[in-house]
Image (cartoon, coloured by chain):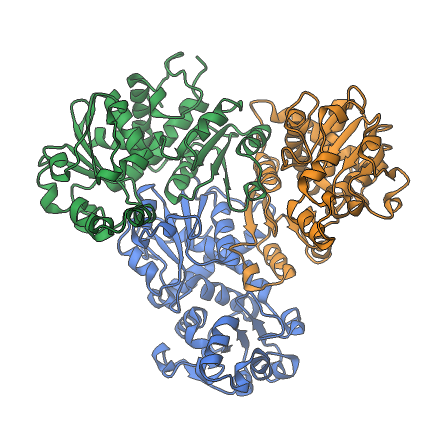
Chain colours: A green, B blue, C orange
Amino acid sequence: MLFVAPGMWTHRHLLGIDALSATDIDTVLDHAGRWLELSRSAERKTTLLKGRTIINLFFEASTRTRTSFEIAGKRLGADVVNVSSSGSSVTKGETLLDTAKNLEAMRADAIVLRHSSSGAPGFVAGRVGCPVINAGDGAHEHPTQALLDALTIRAAKGRLEGLTVAICGDITHSRVARSNALLLGKKGAKVRFTGLRTMLPKEAETLGSSVTVVPRFEEAIEGADVVMMLRIQNERFAADAQKKGASPMSTTREYSRTFGLNAQRLARAKPDAIVMHPGPINRGVELDPSIADGQRSVILDQVEAGVAVRMAVLELLLAAPAA
Amino acid sequence: MLFVAPGMWTHRHLLGIDALSATDIDTVLDHAGRWLELSRSAERKTTLLKGRTIINLFFEASTRTRTSFEIAGKRLGADVVNVSSSGSSVTKGETLLDTAKNLEAMRADAIVLRHSSSGAPGFVAGRVGCPVINAGDGAHEHPTQALLDALTIRAAKGRLEGLTVAICGDITHSRVARSNALLLGKKGAKVRFTGLRTMLPKEAETLGSSVTVVPRFEEAIEGADVVMMLRIQNERFAADAQKKGASPMSTTREYSRTFGLNAQRLARAKPDAIVMHPGPINRGVELDPSIADGQRSVILDQVEAGVAVRMAVLELLLAAPAA
Amino acid sequence: MLFVAPGMWTHRHLLGIDALSATDIDTVLDHAGRWLELSRSAERKTTLLKGRTIINLFFEASTRTRTSFEIAGKRLGADVVNVSSSGSSVTKGETLLDTAKNLEAMRADAIVLRHSSSGAPGFVAGRVGCPVINAGDGAHEHPTQALLDALTIRAAKGRLEGLTVAICGDITHSRVARSNALLLGKKGAKVRFTGLRTMLPKEAETLGSSVTVVPRFEEAIEGADVVMMLRIQNERFAADAQKKGASPMSTTREYSRTFGLNAQRLARAKPDAIVMHPGPINRGVELDPSIADGQRSVILDQVEAGVAVRMAVLELLLAAPAA
């Protein structure tokens, strides 16, 4: 693996992209790149984190992220213990902090935390002695997702700097959009948010000058290097629609008609534009199946990059020499 | 372990007994026999699949099969990751194929798949790059169950050829019955299907000339070397009964009276006949407790053979030299 | 690790404190003390139980206990397989014994069993060939909890002999109270049970002469070395209250007012008294948050001791030389 010079990586936790510098991001991506290579070889398992205990503490269901972290931890030789909200003390009303303090007392070496409340990982991180990794918190951040997206883009395009990335979906509620916008801004890429007006932030500027809001989908895609489609949360969508009196736009079909990515629309992006999606995909809603499975889709590359990025994060937080 | 000559084992997946030759079956059973021996010794763990990631992807609940595969994988030194439908992307509506493709992208070395739809493992196998093992699909096949049953019979009787095996239960809906009939036919055993008329296939001949349908239970058992009782699915049974207007036969008690295996009925089989059941047992319904726990029951031998057979299958699919 | 002289540890199972001698308890605590030290070092993982399969068979949800056993087993190098009632054959109606016999047939080296029925682990232990560890059974025993509590008290006080331990809560239904009373009695400590009259046993004397029932909380705490608060099961509490016609005492607030531990009440105990709780805590009900997180709380020490005690128990049952 790469040598991390003392002081090069100074973070104890990974709570969000917000706290990372452009150099930090490069460090994660460089390390992840090595793990990606290794994961394609026969000898893909190491003993780097042998004897360490990593806890996957998931208060929201997620196959992809939980499995990705579990595989990442095991490939590094660690023991991974899954704790999910169903079947846990959570149902007995224990507080998040008590649960985390308990895991710390069991000498957990890292807590990977997914929670529906924005800021939950930060809250815990300030109060336990072991590294906390945010695996998605409310509408706040999902830093490993943004890092794996960046690794995927970098692998496809050779760089992040100067690229234009259109992100389409329920931006307001999306931690994926938020973390991506932060990361891409720090790395010198331009971000265009698009989606239903009710799903767009009023002040995208809070995410930096690199972000612009472009309500019209076609316009947002125009000349983009990357088109990132977000999953439409049908439930939330339906609820919103009902609240507003079931306008035509409020149906899934209507959404798909206006914001579904198909070949015709994708033609507006750069000829070599790539298509991304954090999954799970609603086929036929935000993404036409022919695009999801097409040559320009890097969706499965994202999944592969996910394990590598999580290995890199665990490595940097748990195995790097102290600063 | 046994040497697998190049080209001797040519299968990339284990989707069903249907695709296996009699020689293939012997290969699995021979390898499994070795693992069975090893599992009884103190040094029962190997490093054969060290660094490999096996995914247990279960869309139906099953302690026995999931646990058996998990233990098999771990005894071979692999990392085993459980993904079940509850708490997974499945609840978010992701397709089976997307889930499988994701696991493949995470560099899974094998996917063990249980699904309520017949053909699901075959569908996935044709579309992912890693071996797929069918852990039971709808009313189609349950190949590792048939293989562990065969290993158990072979251990008890020294052979499969020429034996008479009575299989009693809801044959129409049973993947266990189907896989067993296919395997036993290929290995030269005779199979008699028995059970309620509504539970018997109209054309058993599709499973080969070795299978006959014998509606009367006593007649089916007569002179049998093996009596295999299937679990009665009370739910399905009740539903069927209701549909038909609650005839006397439609109650569990009536079923037990006519098709429950007890000492008196077992006396019709060969004096050294063995009793099998894939579990979990409905004690007092299809099987009298005295028989389930009696000297002729090999039910727990089946469970033990299960781990050995699954180790053999994982070995052959993942560790055997390429043909 | 410590040397266990042949014949020093003669138990095949850990079903309850009831069966342990004072010397047995010391043996567990001494071994656990070593594991506690080791768990604080960087090299906290051993290969002592390499190749062994430990099954966590939980018929009641429990983050803490399941996770603690899982970490303990993995730190000893064993493979740990979780089997919980949801998603298991249990939902198909299989008997507990059949499930256990199946796990034995898969060559489980130990079954860690939690069950809502008192005596379930003992029932299973008499019928399977592998060690059974009681992880809590109904209102009967929770021996590893009492052992970890004893390790925690010993670490804080240097001894168990001669101490006064007040245990407050729903004593009648508490396996924690019962196992603690048994252990503390065997080790020469005095126990005072306190709580609502409806929650106190009528004949505490059955637990030995070391136990007295002291209904008034303040009196029970008076001069105590240890104050152990039990979790109030709000559900049970509410049900009881309703049955009795909703007296003022029957509300949670009332309970808290009379039996909640706060600074004022704790002042009645010895100046160096410690506060314990098996968790999960109902903050503000049985325990004031300032006490739970205060300097005299050893609640997280208990959690840490839990992993060490479970390692010691697994070691003694699985790795000690045969007597």
Horizontally, is C280 left or right of A167 in the view? right
- Quadrant placement of the C terminus of chain A: top left
Q: Nearer the viewer, residue C312 or C261?
A: C261
Residue A37 visible from this viewpoint: no
Question: What percent of the width, then of the height, locates residue C1?
Answer: 68, 29
Residue B20 visible from this viewpoint: yes
Horizontally, is A268 left or right of C11 in the view? left
When the figure is inspected, residue B245 is found, relative to residue B58, above or below; the finding is: below
Q: Nearer the viewer, residue C27 or C298?
A: C298
When the figure is inspected, residue B22 is found, relative to residue A293, above or below; the finding is: below
When the figure is inspected, residue B234 is found, relative to residue A142, above or below; the finding is: below
- Quadrant placement of the N terminus of chain A: top left
- Residue A195 location, quadrant: top left
Question: What percent of the width, then of the height, locates residue A48?
Answer: 44, 27
Horizontally, is B10 left or right of C137 in the view? left
Q: Nearer the viewer, residue C240 or B151?
A: C240
Horizontally, is A14 left or right of A159 in the view? right
Q: Residue at x 75, y 49 (%)?
A: C140
Total tally of numbered discs in the picture: 0
Question: What percent of the width, then of the height, locates residue B57?
Answer: 41, 52
Q: Residue at x 48, y 26 (%)?
A: A123
- Residue B53 location, quadrant: top left
Q: Nearer the viewer, residue B187 or A38?
A: A38
Question: What percent of the width, then of the height, locates residue A219?
Answer: 11, 35
